[in-house]
Amino acid sequence: MTPTATYRLQFHAGFTFADGAGLAGYLRDLGISHVYASPVAVARAGSTHGYDVVDPTAINPALGGEAGFRQMAAALKAEGLGIILDIVPNHLAVGGSDNAWWLDVLEKGEASAFAGLFDIDWRPRDPALQGKVLAPFLGAPYGEALAGGDIRLESGPDGSLWVMAYGHHRFPIRAADRAEVFKLGLEAYDPAREPGRARLHELLERQPYRLAWWQTAGDEINWRRFFDITELAGVRVEDPEVFDRIHALPLRLYAQGLIDGLRIDHIDGLADPARYLTRLRGELAKLEAARPAGSAPGPAYLVVEKILAEGEALSRDWACDGTTGYEFMDGVSALLHEPDGAAPLAALWREISGREGDYEDEEHAARLEILTHGFAGQVEAVAGAFHDLARGDLKTRDLTRGALRRAITQLLTGFSAYRLYGEGEALSAGEADILAQAMAKAQAAIAPADRPGLDQIEAWLTGGGPGAPDARRRALQRFHQLSAPVAAKSAEDTAFYRYLRLISRNEVGSYPGRLASDAGEFHTANLARAKDWPGSMLTTATHDHKRGEDVRARLAVLSERPEVWATRVRPWLAGAPPQIDPADAYQMHQTLAGALPLDLDMDDAAELKVFGERVAGWFTKALREGKLRSSWAVPNADYERACLAYLDRCLGDRAYLSALSGLVEEIAPAGAIKGLAQALLRCTSPGVPDTYQGTELWDFSLVDPDNRRPVDFALRQQMLSQTSPENALADWRSGAVKQMVIARTLGLRRARPDVFAQGSYEPLQVEGRQKDAVIAFARRTATDTVIAAAVISSPTALARGLPLPDPEWWHDTVVKLTADQGVSFRDHLSDQAHTAGAVPAARLFAHLPVALLALEPQG
């Protein structure tokens, strides 16, 4: 079944299934139909997110185990709620000593029953890795670690297993070598002495793995990672046996009626997403009859984490209900920004940073850098696969591996999307456009001698060209599975931290090169979703967002007031230390302006310290993700200390704090108006609205782990029971008004599901002097109508200093509700009555900057 509304919960040792069960009544009152649960399989000890799974076949005991999960499911079901479960089919956590499948591969090599589960190239170009797995987990070069005694033998817990130890990592010794170790004893392998060190090295050389310094991974790794994270290894879920292993738990939970659907993590990491979804949908369908009486009717709800590029649409042949909603997050954010602010903000950015390029230039440079350094080994593997394909035919056998590698690098550098799909069949129209644009960029950049290789790769990608089908399939799969992580690392994790025109648009799923859109574009996207993907998820906050939804909403106000922002920020930047890049100082001031809590007492040193520590965590991550003056690979401690000292200095400067709080007081009411619009639009647009944990109040969080901080649910429960339309806006700083808007809107969705699930989507006309400040639409069936209307622009005059336009500001602006005469509506947010026709905006938004009108029963 399709949920009416979901609520994302992040489970970990500090928030278990018992805690989730305790929220059942609150979530029901909030209007939620399904808990959207983070991964629950056994993850690495201490995991706060669950994506580092070490055993996908069992539920994590740290969360409460299977018994706890069943109790939570029962508690939720008692309140009418189900569960949508997040699963991780693309990778498993490796390294350490907790993944039995991985350890078995390290011990037995290709003979392991799990050798085909992980995506390992057992025959790489490097002769030292033939039949071996590169294990780049050492904190220092191999020779240094060996000589320093960091690598040693130790006994297993029961004395029967001999392992190599390095930090928390454990590497098993082949069964064939254990007799020797038992015979000679541990002392014979003591690295503190030359004979022991030599014997230890010889022993290591016989193992099915090669220990290596972690910095070798980018160039030499012979297995697919999740992005560039060496402790997350890709799995071959396209293999039927692997599919069955990875999905045994979620399919069993679905068959037993404990869950109603699945969210698929990082669908682009899979070899063939369309084929995978068809298989998964089929397996779920087979289980329908087995579900217990009282279970939600099928089919199972199935959504995928997929980032769509500008102009890219989700393929209609995918057997799912839609995406997790990043494209909606982008669309509603763009709607809240002012297009006219793009040019002055870009000019200010160039003035501050000294960089002339636009976002596209930054991403292009980042892609080339990532391909050349972070993914050089995987580029080499793709080149090798295409080289094998070329060697299989006389017409292409003279294409060299080097030429193909250079062509692959240039082609992927020019990609605008995460990846293409399929295994050599004709591309869709959208994919053909993406490839054509990338080819044009590559042809302009590549050396003439390498163009034949580039042209041949294009032919293979589009279904032409010679070669054996299996070789073609392997080459294309490797290409596609490289394309997606390169896109993520170069855009979200690099360019987003380099191009800083206005960081509210540097969000997962967004294109920072586009600052804003208009109501027409938003309506077009909603109409397309209503037609093609009515079950797609709608989100505005996630566990992966760069900054909270209300940080983005507040910063969007600056797009309407670029001159005000420039006047404020220039003096701040003038006082920055000379050793700090002005661009880094600029993003810090944007972050402080966007994330400053509304209830922060500037005279409370303890509160200010906590806020400063949160921003410092973001700042450090931002510097390292940007990879210009520091990085995760090689942190620049001196530069980071200088930046954090500057942050501390600003937060300790009374004059700066006064100026900062003055700016926030000036823009916060308008930011709240936009935040309420964002919430209403998410809850009323075609699709399934998702609320990320805690964001029913104002969300001024920063990038993870800040956005995964503990949530005060007791406060939220108390607020929900006490807030009414009469007091909500007066107490707007607490966020109670946002919670009320969400609860009442979702309550209406639950009471009238048909109009939201099957109703038409009809943009409504707005006329008058402030017509561009409003967006309105109707959801309509033959017997019911619901109208959503919201203020999306900042008013220049506020009513009583509240986040509400002054009635006089509206002038002659009207919202045309419907052509029907005499039809009555009730606003479910303000409890006010309205009659069909042209309703003055001053009356429609007299109590709140958002309105939710529902047709009143006749008679």
Image (cartoon, rainbow, N blue to C red):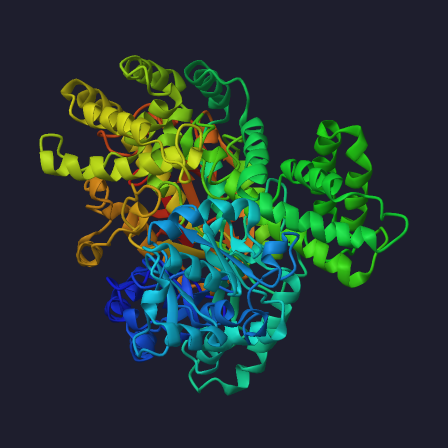
Q: Residue at x 59, y 55 (%)?
A: 128
Judge whether residue 817 can be spotted in this image.
no
Q: Position of residue 117 (x, y in %)?
A: 56, 69
Q: Residue at x 22, y 30 (%)?
A: 800
Q: Position of residue 675 (x, y in %)?
A: 35, 40
Pick the residue in front: 272 or 660: 272
**Where, quadrant-wise, is the C terminus in this rendering?**
bottom left
Q: Residue at x 82, y 52 (%)?
A: 391
For residue 122, side relative to residue 502 (left or right)? right
For residue 38, side relative to residue 798 (left or right)? right
Q: Position of residue 286 (x, y in %)?
A: 58, 81
Pick the residue in front: 747 or 487: 487
Task: Tell me: residue 713, above or below residue 638.
Answer: below
Q: Quadrant of residue 120?
A: bottom right
Task: Tell me: residue 678, above or below residue 628.
Answer: below
Q: Residue at x 44, y 28 (%)?
A: 628
Q: Quadrant of residue 751?
A: bottom left
Task: Tell me: residue 853, above or below residue 594.
Answer: below
Query: Which residue of the protein is positioned furthest toward the right in this rendering?
Result: 394
Q: Position of residue 760 (x, y in %)?
A: 56, 55
Judge whether residue 508 can be spotted in this image.
yes
For residue 718, side relative to residue 62 (left or right)? left
Number of callouts: 0
